[in-house]
Structures are given as structure tokens and as C-alpha cells.
Amino acid sequence: MPFRSVLLCGFVLFVIGQLPAIAVAETVKFPPDQLEFFETQVRPLLSAHCYECHSVDAEKVQAEFWADSRDALIKGGDSGESIVPGDPDNSLFMEAIRWESYEMPPSGKLPDADVETFAKWIRIGAPWPKEDKPTAAAERPSFDLQQRAQEHWAWQPIDAPDAPKVKQQDWPRAELDRFILAKLEEKQLSPAKDADRLAVMRRMHFDITGLPPTPEEILRFKEDMLPEAFERLADTLLDSPHYGERWGRHWLDLVRYAESRGHEFDDDAVNAFQYRDYVIRAFDADVPYDQLVREHIAGDLLENPRLNAENGFNESILGTGFWFLGEWVHSPVDILKDESDRFDNMVDVMSKTFLGVTIACARCHDHKFDAISTADYYSLTGFLQSSDFRQVRFDSVEKNRSVSQQLAQVDAKYRRQVVSLLAENQLVVPRRQPLPKAISDVLVFDYEDLTSDQMIQDGYIFGDRPHRSGDPLLVTSDETPKIGFATSGNAANDPAWDGLKSIAQKNFLNRSRLAKMPRSGRTLRTPTFEITDGFVACKIRGNGFVVACVDSHRHLSGPLHKETVLEVTKDQSFVELNLSRYQGHRVHLEFTPAENERLQIAFVLQGTKKQLKQSVAAYADKPSVEWDEFNKDASEKVGGDLDLIAEKWAKSRKKVARQIVKTSRTAMAMLDGTGEDAHVYIRGNSSKSGDLEPRHFLTAISSNAPLEIKKGSGRLQLAAQINDPANPLSTRVVVNRIWHNLMGRGIVPTTDDFGVLGQRPTHPELLDHLATQFLNDGRSIKQMIRSIVLSRTYQMCSQVDATAAKLDPKNLLWHHRPPKRLEGEAIRDSLLAVAGNLDPKLFGQSVPIHLTAFMNGRGRPKKSGPLDGDGRRSIYVSVRRNFLSPFMLTFDTPVPFSTMGRRNVSNVPAQALILMNDPFVIQQADSWAKRALQQSEAATERVQWMYLTAFARQPTVSELDVAMEFVGQESSVKRWSAFAHALINTKEFIFLR
């Protein structure tokens, strides 16, 4: 750069630098996604680690440095300027939290992930919402939630507006067209003319199935000139199984779908692909949206779950897998903070996906802008705290539920017969003597007293209830059934369920110590309790494992937290866990028998090491004299009768047990746990617990009254609140998403944020009209798509009127349909389709990602996937958080961290470069050329066929001339491949007209 230019630039920067910080701040306007990043990721860190000493609420502000406003952070304190927006490496703030100069916070260095969050925030310009200057709490206006709700449009009830009257009566084809036209006519504007029929056809194919129409489909449609042609086309496309793949991919953006956990080792999220396949099937089946919501929030709790039409497995339970698609840290030092971060992401995704509001912004304080309180936030974490993770045996869960109920009925029947026989013969079964005081003083749970509701298990192998002392039992020894009696209360696994086989994802990479244990459908868990004394002992007998699940953390790898997993062997009568490092934390125990082995759990104790030693010494693990006498009397008086009952009991059980489905696929799902309310964390800091907050829905919608939850998590009640037609958010949000995915921009452009920081609807009456129609149509997504694609608005052309462009430059009124760029998945799938390499196979384990030479790092898969992904659609290619496809990233496929209902649509040089140089693109161009050469001997016909295949139209005269001049009469693959490659690199290949 010439010296003069350098001098001029330096002068300009100098002048800008001298402007008061407040003036600069006022001119900065940040996009909503950056403001959301600040509110959900940065402000909580500032609040937790900085405000105590560096805010208006600090007792004494240290170093004259305030961290509670952007201006103050830029200005700095005694040491000078603190942050340089856009330049973290030259920001004193970053030096301090990296402990490179000052060491902040003084309590300990922040985790690397938090440091990187601050660095990213400064790198993107230190976004901060426009807000009043911070004031001390005493001066701050009170948070008026109801006033905020009354003043903002999104919280108002859904209206059912009449379609407005319009002047151009012949233009509307659907009711929604009237709302669009009325707004245009208010500005004396007219809508664009209809698009070319084939352009609309191509538009519909991509919008509904994500695939280009074939030449055969184009020609058939071209010949169908009847008025109902578009209706038939819409119905055909909506009935295509590829519709579910297309719209399933839209949905996966919302739930941050990925198949690995990210972070250091990028372990597999085992069986995540089963959730993806569930979503595709649900969209293809047009499951009503309220049912889809219900399945996601509480599909494991439905009394009548939706069963797969072909194979009869439980579909509903698979929806709950979405909760667990987030990032997981293996063996974090602070597991309570890790849990609060995981819950934060789960609440964030749930609230944006189904409600379109940023509830996670209320983690540290009442929402800065919306009618959402911190109490609302923590009330929702209570639903998660009351739930648990499992790999559910979804193929067999419903069938085996029925079998387990039948076995329970058989057992109850023969127990009654034994009890009746004993009563007739004046035989009284002894009961367990009271536990010694040394045990009762430290008793946490006793299966003698535990109710059926408290006996939580993944599967059915532990029966329908614990055994009580004196319960008749069927005992099989040397193949001869006998009647025995429980001498104490216990939970024991039933041998009828031996041989269960779980089919999980093949060749998975997961370092968790739990991943390879035979736990699916074979695990009993205790209610949750608090660790108060540090040592926990279990009266146990048999072979298996006990896991102490502290603060719901189960991604155990390496030496940290290894004390939470113990193996149990037959020679042990008590096992002890040293959980002293977790005092004050919540825990539940999980018991899993070794394969085809017995495991029996009687009670759980907690105390000091000395107390537990005394308790174990005080326990007499042998039958009393009273039991000896009873057994002798029973054998003499009713021994033969008991043997007959035992024989019938065993035969009845054997007959029922034959129905057990022993082999099943597994998938991530929720399991209801102990119903708990969550503590509010002061300023979002998990080490500073405040009051308990009862579980309830958003106060602005249904008040903050606790939900009536009789047992368990209450997620079914939460789902009902979300689905309630009186909830103004959920229905508006979903119809807005459908509109956005078809039209390229939502009626509310910020699809995931209907709050104050989001954009207001351009057509609020249309939004409510569509929401009302959606409810009246049974919440059918397919019906809503059909009504939109058949509208005149959808089928407008992209030609821009000069007057309209001047009056409405952003096309907010929809005076034309702007060209819409295809997403990365649709571009890649199109390449496979035109090349004839697309494998239409549905479902199944994902194809491994193809690894380029530049895709390095820890957790890199050992084997690379094929360059073309085996020809499978992009939705079936593995999504690994640390190794995302460069092709997809170039075309703005989102990084799976949180909900992304509106993808970025960039136009950068990398896109042209990747279409020109990527080996996959070149490979498909070669295949397309070979197909063209097989179509016809005539070069002209080949060119026409390729244009039809790529663009759903014939080439113009000039295009044909240019093409013929390039290919001539040659039949070389190289020449035709170059021509195919040139077509791929046109804008029309990746845009919809």
C-alpha cells in the first residue's frame, strides 16, 4: 500500500479512536445471533466470575474497573483499556483471564472453553445489546414480567383474522394470498407475475424432497396441462419417502443433531442415528405436530405410545433422544457445573425449537428484555433434574412390557395360592426383625419398604416390585422348582430375562467406562439422594456392577471419578463407595447384573467410614431360629402341596417367558427418575444455590403456580402446556418455520427468537391466520406445506419491479420471490442425482465422514469414509462435531451447538473454489458426463438432456450454441466432463429461480 494511503488510514483510525466510547457504542448495531451468543454464553460468565468485584453491585469496585457494560469494558480501569473489539490477543482482559499478566479471577483460572468463549466474543466485535447504563440494585427498576408480556406481540393470544379485502380479486389463489396482496396494495404495489411452470416444478421438488426432478418427471409434468397439475405434483412429492429426509434435515438443525460429543476426544454419541431415522419416519407419516412435541418432551411416558406401522416398535420413546444430542465433557472436574451447562443447552434447544424464545438468557438473571424470569429458567431445569439417560431397547420395550405384566400377574396368582395354603394350615411366615440401630441410623433406602413407584428401572428384569420379607418365591434349583420365602426385602433380577442381547451402533468410539457394560434394559436405579457423609454402602449379593451417578454425570473416562463405578462379585455381601469428594451433591445408584448372573440388593446406607464399619458388623446375614422352625413345619404340613404349586407356577411362567423378545436395537432415550425441583443458582453459579423453584411452565403464559405432578418428572404435564392451544408461541413458531423453509425468510425473520431482540413479523395477521389454519387442520405439517406451495405467493417469479424495489428494497412485502440458494445437503444430493450415483436407500447407520488431509486433531476417526459417502443422501453421512464436512461448512451447514432454524446464506469465494476443485464434485461431473454420452449419439440431444437434468429446462439458443462450440462432435469423457463441471459451476445449479 502506498505510504500516503497508509498515513491516511492511520489518521482515520486515530480520529475514530479519539471519539468518546459511548458515541462509538451507540453507532454499533449487532445482529441477533451475536447478541444471543453474548446473552447465553458471555454474560453468564461475566456475572459468575467478574461482577462480584467489578460491577455496580460490588461492595467495593476493584481497580476502578467495571465489567457490567460494553463501554466500561472497553475503557478499562487503572491499567488502561481492557478490550479491543475484534482483537482478543491485544486485549488486556484476555491477558488477565489467560493468567499471562494479571491472574483473574483470583479464585482460579477459568476452563479453556470459557477463555475461548471470551476470545470469540471479542473477536466478533464484543457484541452487547443496547441497554440503559447499569445501576445499583437499589436503583434498578423492578422486573415486571406481566407488563413485558402485555407489551410484546408474541405473548398475545392468537387471533383468527378474516382475510382482508383486495382489489385484484383474480390474483389470490389461496386465503394467504389475500394477506400478501393487501399489504402490497396499501403501498400501491403489485405482485410479480407467475413463474414459469417448470421453474415452479423444480422449486417444489427441491423444497419438498430436496432433490431435482428427473427428465422423465419433467416431461410428464410438462404434458399435464390440467388445472390440477400442481395439486397432483404437491401430493406426489409429499407422499415421497424423500420428503421425510428433506424436512427431517430441517428439523435436525433445530435439535443440534450430531453423532459425536465434541470436546477433547469427540466420542460417539452412540446410536444417535436412530433418532435421525425416527424424525424422517415421523415426517413421512405426517405425525401431528402436537404428537411430535409430546414424543420429544415425554415420549417415554405415554400410556399409548405410537407404534411403528410395519414392525410394531415404540416410535414415541425415540423422540426423547433429542434431549441428549448435545456436547458431553468426559470426566469434568466440576461435575455440578458440567450438569448445569448440559441442562442449559437442553433448555436452550427445547425453548427455541418449540417456543421460539431464549429462555437460556435467564440463567443468571431475569431476562434483560423478555417476559422470562430466572425462576422460569430453573423451574424447567427441574424437569431435567427429575429425568435420566438410557439406551432403550426400543424394538422390544412394548412387547416386553406386556410380558412383564403377564409375569407379574402369574406371580401374584401363585403367591396368593401359597399364602392361602399357609393360612389354612395355621402357618405364619416370619417377618424380618427390625434392623439394628447401627444400621437404621444410617439407612438411606430399604427395599423392604420401597414402593413400586420408587423402584425405577430401565427394563423389566427386576420385576414389578421389590420382594418383601415373607414373600413366597419360585426357586429353581437343579431344574426342580421349589417354593421359597424371602427372608428380607430385596430387589433381585429374574432369570427369565437372561440372554437379552442389545444391538447397538457398530464400531462405536466411546471411552466411557459404562459404554461396554450390559446395561440396556437391565438396570435398576435408586431414588435420588444427597451425599451428606461421603461413604455409601450397599447390602448386595451376586455378580454385577454398581454405579454412583452423581449430578447425572455418566460420561466416565480416565482416572477421574473412577470411584463411582464398582464391580460386585459373589464373595461380597456389602460393597462400599467412597464418595466423600461429592459431599453436598445429588446421587442415585444404578445396579446391573453381569450377563446371565443374579444380583440382589437389600438396602443402601450412608455415613462416615466408622459408622458403616459398625453397621456391617452389626448385620447378621443368616436365617433366624424362627425361620428354621417355619421351614420345618411347612415342609411337614404342606410340603407336597407347595411342590405342586411350584410345578404349576414354573410351567405358567415358562409359557409366558417364551414371549420375551430377547434381541433388540437400542437408542438414546429418557427415563423418568425421582421427581425433584431445582435450586436457583445465584448469578448462574452452580456453587451458589438459592431457593428451590417448583416445576412450572412459563409464567407469562400459565402463571408460576407449580404443576400438579403426582410422581416422576412431570414432563407429560410440561408437554401439555407447550401444546395447549392457549399457548400463543408454539403454533406461531412452527408455521413460521414452515413458511421460512419454503419461502426463504420467515414471517418472523428471526425464526428462533420471537422476543424483543428478534424481528417483528412482517405480516402478523397472516401469521395468525396460518396458525389458526394449522390448528384446524389437526396440526398437519404436510397440509400446511401443501397450502403454501399451491399459493400464488409461492409461485411468483423472481423478476423485480423497479418501483417496488425502491419502495420496499428488502422485499418485506413479498412483491417477488427472490432466488433461493440451495443448502449444502441439497447441492451435494443434486450432484449425486444428476450423476446417477444417488442411492435412494432409507435409514440405517451413518456412512463415516470422508476425512481430508487437513482434518486432523484428537478424536480423529481411524478410518475415513468414502469420498462419495457410498452415494447416500447427505442426511445419512455422519455428523462429527470435531470433523465436520468442509463442503457442508462452506455452504453454511450449521455447527451443531444449539438451535439453528435460520441458516446463514453466504456468498463467498470458497463456494466457487470448492465447486471447481473438490474431488467429489469432479468425480460426479465425470459420472454425469458418462450418463450423457449414453443418452444419445447426437451431441445436441446430450446438451439438452443435461440442461433438463440440471435446471429443469431446455437451453436457450445462445446457450446451445456455446455448448456445441465447446463440446463439438466429440464423445470423449474428458470433454463432456468439463462441460458437466461448467454447468455445476453456474449459479442456476445451486439456486432456485
Image: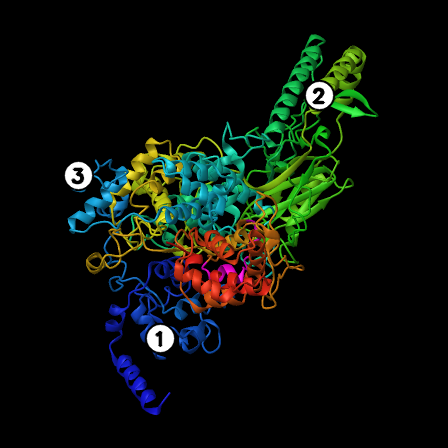
Based on the displayed image, in which of its 4 quarters is residue 451 positioned?
top right
Q: Which residue is mark 3?
A: 165
Q: Nearer the viewer, residue 856 or 201?
A: 201
The residue located at (53%, 67%) in the rendering is: 917
Going from N to C along the chain, the mark reached first, 1 or 3, is 1
Residue 815, percent from left and from top: 25, 51
Looking at the image, which residue is at 71% across and 13% down? 427
Q: Residue at x 23, y 59 (%)?
A: 805
Q: Nearer the viewer, mark 3 or mark 2?
A: 3
Q: Is residue 888 magenta?
A: yes
Left or right placement of residue 83 versus residue 498 in this view: left
* Amino acid type assigned to the residue bearing label 1 in the image: Ala
In depth, the one of 103 and 715 nearer the eye is: 715
| Relative depth, front residue between 836 and 503 | 836
Q: Dot 3 lies on which element?
A: loop
* Label 1 to label 2: alpha-carbon separation: 76 Å
Task: Residue 322 in the image: state x and y as whole percent.
Answer: 50, 45
Left or right of residue 633: residue 681: left
Q: Is disc 2 surrounded by few (<14), some (14 to 19) or many (20+) residues within 10 Å?
A: some
Rendered image: mark on residue 482: none
Q: Which mark is residue 63?
A: 1
Quarter residue 28 falls in: bottom left
Along the horizontal axis of the image, is 373 left or right of 406? left
Q: Is residue 266 magenta?
A: no
* Position in image of residue 381 (x %, y %): 44, 46
| Residue furthest to the bottom | 3
Element carrying mark 2: helix
Seen at 39% across and 63% down, the residue is 46
| Real-space CA distance between mark 3 and mark 2, rounded to the nearest whole angstrom | 71 Å
Image height of 392 relative to 950, above or below: above
